[in-house]
């Protein structure tokens, strides 16, 4: 019997803008609105980046604290998972700022990846160790973010050295321009490569969002969608909200008989309580 489906909504990101989709939230009020739309549709985790009111990405802890308060007001029991990736080019200290708020979870990327053009998302081995140590100190469960198969191997090595504590929860990000493709073969390869006892979420970028969501639903994994990863509800149709993207996952899950996890159930599945 499969666990219930945990849906993560990546509502904002650091790179996508209102020019791409006007629903992308910048202000605290907009972040609250988009988190609530996802939560009310069935998301139990909000993967969070924050912006200045003009849309500039920031990792400022004070800004995150405002966003946390607004999200908790509207979605009292949702799991808030801030990014430690931030935006391309930020320093490690800048990226780690939201950990000072002691969130239940945060992302921890297990390797460096090209993001297209000249953009490189840098995560050296020392960065991984530094972020993991800060998370352990703050009592934050890492979501092991994987853009390629070798990053799973890196996570396994770091777990063997005691840098991170198993069982790990992975986010298999597929279809980034520079990372592993979003194909059925590569999905099976990644899932097959996970250490025993792991849980995983799949994130398909762009047009891969719902195909990868469907594979994860069938395979007993969990799903991430949101405007950070994909701005379209279907071909050529912009999503009006993050909630619309979550609703589509809920419909797909229903077709395959997969029930949706509440935030409390997600905490049990992920060992957060
Ligand atoms: N915006 C990227 C540089 C994460 O949130 O952990 C990093 C990112 C990954 O989005
Ligand atoms: Zn992110």
Image: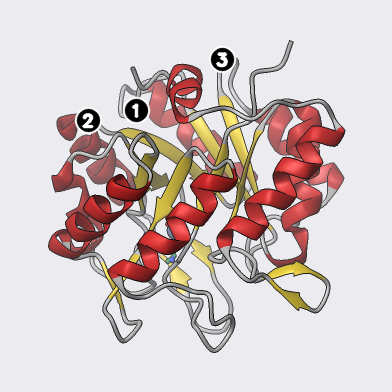
Q: In this view, does 73 lie above or below 59?
A: above
The image quadrant in which ligand 2 is located:
bottom left
Give the Cα distance between marks 2 and 3. 20 Å
- Asked which secondary structure carries label 1, the reply is loop
| Mark closest to the chain's N terminus, 2 or 1 | 2
Residue at the image position 85 percent from the left and 45 percent from the top? 184
Compared across the picture, whether 148 is left or right of 11 comes to: right
The spot of residue 233 in percent (x, y) is: 74, 66
Q: Nearer the viewer, residue 12 or 147?
A: 12
Residue 126 seen in the figure: no
Residue at the image position 33 percent from the left and 17 percent from the top? 273
Disc 1 marks which residue? 164
Disc 2 marks which residue? 136
Residue 247 seen in the figure: yes
The spot of residue 100 in percent (x, y) is: 14, 46
Give the Cα distance between marks 1 and 3. 14 Å
| Mark closest to the chain's N terminus, 2 or 3 | 2
Q: Which of 25 and 181 is in front in this view?
A: 25
Q: Are marks 2 and 1 in contact (CB under 8 Å)?
A: yes
Around disc 1, counting alpha carbons within 10 Å, would you say few (fewer than 14), some (14 to 19), or many (20 or more)?
A: many
């Amino acid at each position: 019997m499969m666990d219930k489906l945990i849906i993560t909504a990546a509502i904002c990101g650091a790179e996508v803008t209102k020019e791409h989709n006007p629903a992308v939230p910048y202000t605290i009020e907009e972040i609250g609105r988009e988190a609530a739309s996802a939560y009310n549709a069935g998301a139990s985790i909000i993967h969070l980046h924050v912006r200045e009111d003009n849309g500039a990405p920031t990792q400022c802890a004070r800004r995150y604290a405002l966003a946390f308060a607004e999200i908790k007001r509207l979605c009292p029991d949702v799991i808030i998972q801030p990014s430690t990736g931030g935006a391309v080019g930020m320093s490690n200290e800048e990226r780690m700022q939201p950990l000072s708020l002691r969130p239940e979870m945060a992302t921890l990327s297990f390797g460096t990846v090209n993001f297209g053009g000249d953009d490189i998302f840098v995560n050296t081995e020392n960065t991984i160790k530094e972020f993991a140590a800060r998370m352990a100190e703050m009592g934050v469960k890492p979501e092991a973010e994987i853009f390629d198969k070798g990053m799973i191997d890196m996570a396994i090595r770091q777990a063997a050295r005691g840098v991170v504590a198993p069982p790990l929860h992975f986010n298999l990000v597929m279809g980034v321009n520079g990372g592993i493709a979003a194909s059925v073969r590569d999905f099976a390869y990644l899932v097959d490569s996970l250490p025993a006892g792991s849980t995983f979420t799949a994130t398909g970028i762009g047009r891969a969002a719902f195909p990868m969501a469907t594979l994860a639903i069938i395979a007993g994994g969990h799903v991430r969608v949101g405007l950070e990863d994909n701005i379209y509800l279907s071909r050529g149709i912009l999503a009006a909200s993050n909630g619309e993207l979550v609703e589509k996952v809920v419909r797909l899950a229903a077709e395959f008989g997969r029930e949706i996890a509440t935030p409390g159930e997600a905490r049990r599945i992920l060992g957060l309580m």
